[in-house]
Image (spheres, rainbow, N blue to C red):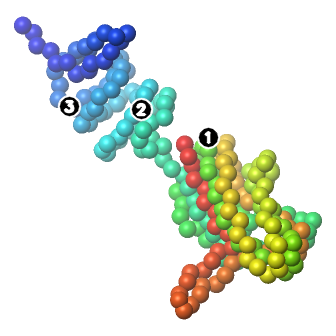
Amino acid sequence: MKRFSIVALFLVAGYAVARVIAPSSSSDSIGSSAFPWPSGHFSSLSVNGFLVPTSSCVATSTYAITAGYAETARYASNAFYPKYYIVLSSTTDLAVTSTTEEYPVVYTDVELSNGLAWSTSAPSRVYSTVTGKTYLVSFSAIASCSSPNKSLDIWAKINGTNVPRSNTRLAIPTASNLMCMVTTFLFADTVPGSYFELWYWSDSTGTKIEHLDAGSSPERPVMPAIITSITSID
């Protein structure tokens, strides 16, 4: 009697159907003409064509992709979705010299980064390096004003154009008191080379987004005027 090894078992319309191929170890290869695998695992797997997952795909060990793959579902493993992120801060005060002008938020330091670009030649801009990502943007800003009952607006721009419905207003009711603004929103990127910025405005020239130097007794770190975090979510 000829022997076979059953390596895949799945249900179709309520019936158990067994797929049979030649005996092999727990390592296997899938070519362009191989049958679909609804579930299962390999200790190692090589792909010589396109890997097209149609359900969840979980990587539990190291792997190497040596050919293309097509995405048809969200994978349970983040390995297929590299994260792009940057965290920026500004350790200088950001002033308002005219109430009829807008001003870019200028950063002085990069705290963390992967896949998003920033340079001192354009210190307000964060550049994308990939296509079709959606980003979560969060920032916290510390502001003060020499006059009471003033306000500060901060909003987003992409490629120099205002992002609709991205503005946030901080009310500063008391003169010289520090106030904190914390905001989170989403934006969708288009092509590599596009850039993201935050801009601000105030109704008083006495307003500034303000940093504080490091403290002592006890020792405390510098408080940046603004900290901005941008992270891809897909």
Per the image, the residue denoted by label 2 is 56
Q: Amino acid at mark 2?
A: Ser
**Circles 3 and 2: CB atoms closer than 8 Å:** no
**Residue at the image position 65 percent from the left and 74 percent from the top:** 224
**Residue at the image position 71 percent from the left and 65 percent from the top:** 181
First in sequence: mark 1 vs mark 3: 3
Q: Secondary structure at mark 3?
A: loop
Per the image, the residue denoted by label 1 is 132
Q: Quadrant of the C terminus?
A: top right
Per the image, the residue denoted by label 3 is 26
First in sequence: mark 3 vs mark 2: 3
First in sequence: mark 1 vs mark 2: 2
User: What crowding class fits label 2: few (fewer than 14 Cα within 10 Å), some (14-19), or many (20 or more)?
Assistant: few
User: What crowding class fits label 3: few (fewer than 14 Cα within 10 Å), some (14-19), or many (20 or more)?
Assistant: few
Q: Residue furthest bottom?
A: 217
Q: Secondary structure at mark 2?
A: loop
Rendered location of residue 92, percent (x, y): 70, 77
Q: CA distance from mark 1 to mark 2?
A: 21 Å
Specify whether residue 49 is in view. yes
**Circles 1 and 2: CB atoms closer than 8 Å:** no
Q: Amino acid at mark 1?
A: Gly
Q: Residue furthest top?
A: 1
Rendered location of residue 171, percent (x, y): 81, 67
Q: Amino acid at mark 3?
A: Ser
Which corner quadrant of the image does residue 215 belong to? Answer: bottom right
User: What crowding class fits label 1: few (fewer than 14 Cα within 10 Å), some (14-19), or many (20 or more)?
Assistant: few
Rendered location of residue 205, percent (x, y): 88, 75
Q: Quadrant of the N terminus?
A: top left
Above or below for 131 versus 11: below
